[in-house]
Image (tube, helix red, strand yellow):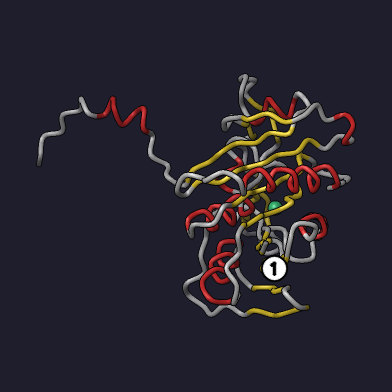
Amino acid sequence: MKILVSNDDGISSGGILALERALQKLGDVYTVAPDRPQSSMSHALTLHRPLRVEEISPRHYAVDGTPTDCVKLALTGLLTVKPDLVVSGINHGPNLGDDIIYSGTVSAAIEGALLGIPSIAVSLVSFKDFIFDAAAEFTVALVSQILQITLPPSTLFNVNVPAIPKQEIKGWKLTRQGKRHYSEKIVERVDPRGRKYYWIGGDDLGFAHDNGTDCMAVHEGFVSVTPLQADLTNYRFLQECRSMVIPWP
Ligand code: MN
């Protein structure tokens, strides 16, 4: 089996190294990942400058682009083989609820799914003391299962692993995307030349305690596994919208 690994924290991050090591038990691992941190890049593609690729060791490529650039490059010409699977991560930090829309980690997996390859995004729900063992081992177990089923088009799995000792993890749960709350305050400062500048990035204010969500599962000590789709259509609301009458201008 051939596995493409990518991430958004950069090719030398601890999370991607742990993931590569674990997946090597299952087959040949090819890593194509950003040469520097690219978190929160979402699904950005680089179109207005060339991309440079450095082969830093056999089957290891560092790209001066986004996570989506990496997966697109890998699957559309850089690699001479077609991977059976794309795994993105292990992210240093959660990708729960609203995080998903901003996440470079998840977007790398979305790109894999859009290009027709079963894909998984894996994140460790921690902000310090990153120990990736449990997340890496669970990913190996999940991969073995995923390859036995047929995923619907443009569908991927988003996995979040609580950062507690492996023996304290209660198991895993299938979940839906939840809702996280962040402080909406922006930080305004003044530079040495007297001009204002701003920092985005609010405090984490917790999450909506809704049963069945990714946030809740991790909170309760379970690994969360959410099937996601790249098709963002709100199908339930689409039905309601059918009653709208908009006069043609
Ligand atoms: Mn990241």
Q: Is mark 1 on a helix, strand or loop?
A: strand
Picture coordinates of residue 216, whole percent (x, y): 68, 25
Q: Nearer the viewer, residue 3 or 232?
A: 3
- In the visual, does 184 lie left or right of 165? left
Picture coordinates of residue 99, whole percent (x, y): 61, 41
Residue bearing the label numbered 1: 30
Picture coordinates of residue 232, whole percent (x, y): 42, 42
Image quarter (top left, top right, bottom left or bottom right) of the N terminus: bottom right
- In the visual, does 106 lie left or right of 234? right
- Up/down of 214 relative to 120, above or below: above
* Residue at 89%, 35% in the rendered image: 165
Say how many tags the image has: 1
- Up/down of 234 relative to 104, above or below: above
Which amino acid is tagged 1? Tyr
Q: In the displayed orientation, state which residue is furthest to the front.
A: 148
Q: Which of 24 and 157 is in front in this view?
A: 24
Q: Nearer the viewer, residue 208 or 87?
A: 87
Crowding near the residue tagged with mark 1, few <14, some 14–19, many ≥20 C-alpha atoms within 10 Å: many
* Residue at 38%, 34% in the rendered image: 234
Mark 1 CB in 8 Å range of ligand 1? no
- Up/down of 186 relative to 205, above or below: below
Picture coordinates of residue 236, whole percent (x, y): 36, 27
Image quarter (top left, top right, bottom left or bottom right) of the C terminus: top left
Q: Nearer the viewer, residue 153 or 200?
A: 153
| Residue 13 placement: quadrant | bottom right
